[in-house]
Amino acid sequence: MKLFFGYIRQQWGVLLAFGLFAVFFCTSFYFYGLPVEAALYPALLCALTGGVFFAADFYRVYHKHRELRRLQKLSAAMIGALPEPDNIAEADCQAVIMSLIEEAARLETEADAKYRDMAEYYTLWVHQIKTPITSMRLTLDKEDSPLSRKLSSDLLQIEQYVEMVLAFLRLNSESSDYVFREHSLDEIIRQAVSKFAAEFIDRRISLDYTSTEKKIVTDDKWLSLVIEQTLSNALKYTQEGKIKIYVSEPTTLVIEDTGIGIDPADLPRVFEKGYTGYNGRTDKRASGLGLYLCKRICAKLGAEISIASEQGRGTKVRINLDQYRLTRE
């Protein structure tokens, strides 16, 4: 009905002109003393004939309206030929639309090419920078001193930032880099924790880790990245006390610290890209990308990550890993 009333409003000029013509004829017949019925009868016949033409024209408009509504649901790349124009104005509008579609396609192609070039460059950079990092790691592993432990801790942060770059590129890539298998959750946790062993010792922060005895279906490489980033944040904002790792039922990994906590005003936005909040403004090293990447990786893994925190009393990160269940045949 909305289309019908819109069509009537569009044709109001034609309807008004027909009504005025009928009035003119009837008035002329009246003043010349002719029977007014002689004008009303042809006017009625013209109205009926015009009604048929109006119905046919409305059906044409309705058909075109449906076709255009269907095209609205398609992307610019999927839009093919537009309906045949009925007048010069429609033809001009369609020419403008097709020009804009071609321009959008060209800009998208250029943007894709630029992104691929950037992704290839940074991927190459990541792989090249890993060589001196590995060399430095091997050198530092040969000695055990406060200085070597401090340097190892700093080197670990460099490694994390490098992995964040690579993860960011892969998350935005169209190709899939996820391999889901059954893994021991304890093994993934231990590998992540071992990277921070020197920092735990050097800063005298205790680790309370309860073995989970859980088997999960996930991609161990990507889940390790999430756990490492979470541990890194816990260590960064915990000056003293402990970090606790355990599993709550059914399969929710919990990483809890006794650090400075998160401002309540910042909690709703901690997973936003680039958002650092009050803690980030205090610690200039914060990039606002770590938790953003964790959120996106968990979404790819079919997991859920959430944070609860009290300022001055610590933070608790929950990673729900119960989404995937292994089916044995």
Image (cartoon, helix red, strand yellow):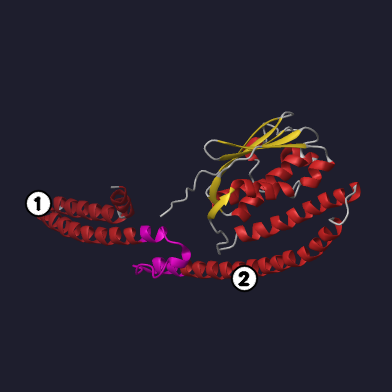
199 w.r.t. 222: above or below: above
The residue indicated by pointer 2 is 113
Image x and y of residue 209, in percent: 68, 38
Distance from label 1 to label 2 (Cα)?
A: 76 Å
Give the foreground label among 1 and 2.
2
Quick one: label 1, few (<14), some, or many (20+) residues within 10 Å?
Answer: few
Is 260 located above or below residue 31 in the figure?
above
| Front-most of residues 289 and 221 | 221
Image location of residue 83, percent across then percent down: 35, 67
Q: Is 78 included in the stretch rendered in magenta? A: yes
* Badge 2: residue crowd in 10 Å (few <14, some 14–19, many ≥20): few
Q: Is residue 148 above or below residue 201?
A: below
Q: Amino acid at mark 1?
A: Glu
Relative to the observer, which residue lies in front, 162 or 82?
Answer: 162
Residue that label 1 marks: 37
Q: At label 2, which amino acid type do we have? A: Ala
For residue 121, which numbered disc appears in the image? none
Residue at 19 percent of width and 59 percent of height:
50
Quadrant for the C terminus, please. Answer: bottom left
> Is residue 290 at all visible to an observer of this figure?
no
Based on the displayed image, in which of its 4 quarters is residue 235 positioned? top right
Residue 213 visible, this angle: yes
From this view, report whether residue 75 is shown above or below residue 269.
below
**Quarter of image, res 108:** bottom right
Tell me what residue is drawn at x 69 percent, y 50 percent: 191
**SS at badge 1:** helix
**Residue 46 colored in magenta in the image:** no
Region of the chain picked out in magenta, as a range: 68-95
Foreground residue, 4 or 313?
313
Q: Are marks 1 and 2 in contact (CB under 8 Å)?
A: no
Return the disc, 1 or 2, that comes first in the chain's sequence.
Answer: 1
The location of residue 283, given as percent across then percent down, is: 80, 42
